[in-house]
Amino acid sequence: MTTTPLAVEATGLVKTFGSNRAVDGVDLRVEAGTVYGVLGPNGAGKTTTISMLATLLRPDGGEARVFGHDVRREPQTVRSLIGVTGQYASVDETLSATENLVIFARLLGLSRGDAKRKARELLERFGLTEAVSRPLKAFSGGMRRRLDLAASLIAQPPLIFLDEPTTGLDPRTRAQMWDTIRELVATGSTVVLTTQYLDEADQLADRIAVIDHGRVVAEGTADDLKSSVGTASLQLRLADTDPVALSTAASLVARVLGTPAVVSPEGARLTAPMTAPDRVTDLLVSFRDAGVSLAEMSVQKPTLDEVFLHITGEAEAADASAAADLEGSLA
């Protein structure tokens, strides 16, 4: 039996700044050839975690390896295997897009001719060919983000850290970035993506870690995390807005599904937890027999927004409870 190699393996990572424990024992396992999403509110420890994995910060505790190489003992080897795109473009605003990319390529050891060829290729790939000679100070935010990502891909490393790469981008540019990320994985790279856009993680990530207060508070696939919040819900809209029909439908839902429905008279809508999916057919038959007509029916899974609010809310409640216990013990 073969196992998928790990691009990142972190155990008990800790980073403190004075009295602030920014990262408090983070564990991560990222399989090669996947997109791994890291979610969390502002100040949760996402960027600090990525900075330690990328050798930009030295961990105060725990261990981390990139393709088996220790980030503390083998930082140069790790750096040869990664690319990093931060929250702010690491480019020179006084230079053109071409000049920036050529400088990056030369620093990575490419010859002058190869550097120019690589710059042209990346500018075309990221839709920046019309702005090759324009100074970066005239670039829009989306163009800067694309150029910064292009710079990190000059050597297309096996592992790419993208720290909130689409922050502030318009929907069209975000979609282009999503396509680029998918292409990176399809051509052999692994991507670790931090984001505050839950739909972005839902669309791109094979697995997701939710970090809050410096700790991983949940981890799994998007479906795993959604299931942890609760079951899907059955959404029903009646063709008849008569209150009697709505009351009849609600009674049938309670009797057949064994759970009460949330009734919204406006629009003649009912919502009920899908605790017994096999009984939905029985419910439809009972509606037909009772003369209740449906205009619309759908099944709605919990969203990652609900997951995020639920999980981070639980973490905050646990921290508040712990603080109250400590205060009580000191009183």
Image (cartoon, rainbow, N blue to C red):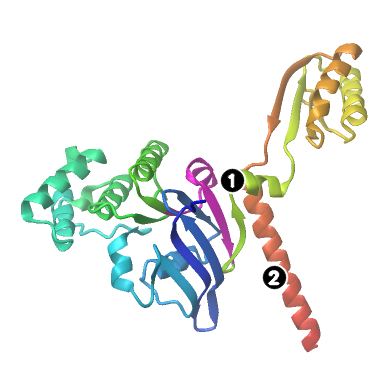
The residue at which mark 1 appears reads as 222
Pinpoint residue 166: horizontal percent, then vertical percent.
40, 48
Magenta highlight on residue 209: yes
Left or right of residue 9, residue 232 in this image: right
Magenta highlight on residue 27: no
Q: Secondary structure at mark 2?
A: helix
**Placement of 111 over or under 277, stated as above or below:** below
Query: Disc 2 versus disc 1: distance between alpha carbons?
Result: 25 Å
Query: Which contiguous range is marked in magenta?
Result: 192-212
Left or right of residue 299, residue 147 in this image: left
- Is residue 242 among what the camera can see? no
Point out the tag, 2 or 1, that comes first from the N-terminus.
1
Q: Which residue occupies the extreme front position in the image? A: 1
Q: Residue at x 18, y 39 (%)?
A: 129
The residue at which mark 2 appears reads as 319
Instruction: Look at label 1 and name its amino acid.
Output: Ala
**Placement of 121 over or under 235, stated as above or below:** below
Q: Which mark is residue 10?
A: none
Pinpoint residue 236: horizontal percent, then vertical percent.
76, 25
